[in-house]
Image (tube, grey):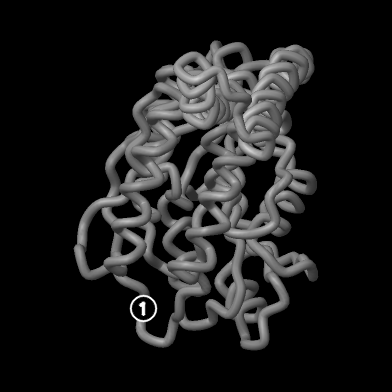
Amino acid sequence: MEPSIAVLLPCRNEAAAIGAVVRGFRAALPGATVYVYDNASTDDTARIAREAGAVVRSEAQPGKGNVVRRMFADVDADVYVIADGDGTYDAAAAPRLIARLLDDHLDMAVAARGGETAAFRPGHRAGNVAINQFVARLFRQRVTDMLSGYRVMSRRFVKSFPALATGFEIETELTIHALELRMSFAEIPVPYAARQEGSHSKLSTWRDGIRILAAILFLFKEVRPFRFFGALFLVLTVISVVLVYPLIVTFLQTGLVPRLPTAVLATGVMLAAIFCLLCGTILDTVSRGRREAKRMRYLSIPPPAAVFRPVQAGASARISHG
């Protein structure tokens, strides 16, 4: 049997572009089912998507993360393609991404954005580069476009993904989920185009950038608590030593008792440092248990190689030339 493919398009007020996007994915993946999840649009997004041939459903809770969580829960398929409904992603690249996912037994293929420089707002481009470098340092793995909204994922990835984010930080959560469980994924360069006239971005450079950065720090604390609290321990220890060193020198040189307020402050900072170290040690054990539970859930779902082994070569060839 050939893999069942679901194309997932979260949308809010994308009437200007959604029709062309649905038709593009239907042409690129004739056997796939295209789902458009309307996130409380006030325009004709739902009607236009339905007329273009999509299965239209709705999610009332605002925020891309809420929509993605609903889509992952509702839709059952072997391969999932997720993209934005604004027309910036190249639907024709989907067969190549799917072929890479199946041929290399990946859990996720990320479309790394390239193409028109004008398609990227300067703040978005700079923020994306900074966040990629930050995550690469935190998790010690190179990532070039962790905020891409165009991805192809296996069923085992989607059905083991907790989807806790509510907004545009969902892409961050997807990437860190793969990094945490050491899943196999790849980034494949694809064209990225400017929005069509009449389509407007819902992403705020500063507000959503801060939310994404906060999500990265929170997830890093969740999945690497010992490193997170260990860093706080080192910082607080250095501060405590800086505070107490002059007091010790004064006492050794003059025999005078140090000033009580400074000594109390230094002691308090050192106690906070020790508390952080203890928290990191305990939470690291808890995090390991949670990671093992996630891993077992992930392993309980058959991988693409096991599902499609009898026809994998032929299916991949047909997809890659779709």
Residue visible at 45% across and 17% down?
Answer: 253
Residue visible at 79% across and 70% down?
Answer: 60
Quickly name the residue at label 1.
196
Residue visible at 58% across and 21% down?
Answer: 230
Along the line of sight, the residue nearer the viewer: 230 or 204: 230
Residue 267 is left or right of residue 149, and the answer is right
240 shown above or below 31: above
Residue 180 is left or right of residue 148, and the answer is right
Report whether residue 69 is seen.
Answer: yes
- Tell me residue 130's x, y (percent): 34, 47
Q: Residues within 10 Å of mark 1 (few under 14, many from 20)?
A: few
- Tell me residue 219's x, y (percent): 62, 36
Amino acid carrying label 1: it is: Gln
Q: Quadrant of the N terminus?
A: top right
Residue 282 is left or right of residue 79, and the answer is right
261 shown above or below 233: below
- Tell me residue 117's x, y (percent): 20, 63
Residue 174 is drawn in which quadrant?
Answer: top right
- Tell me residue 254's x, y (percent): 49, 20
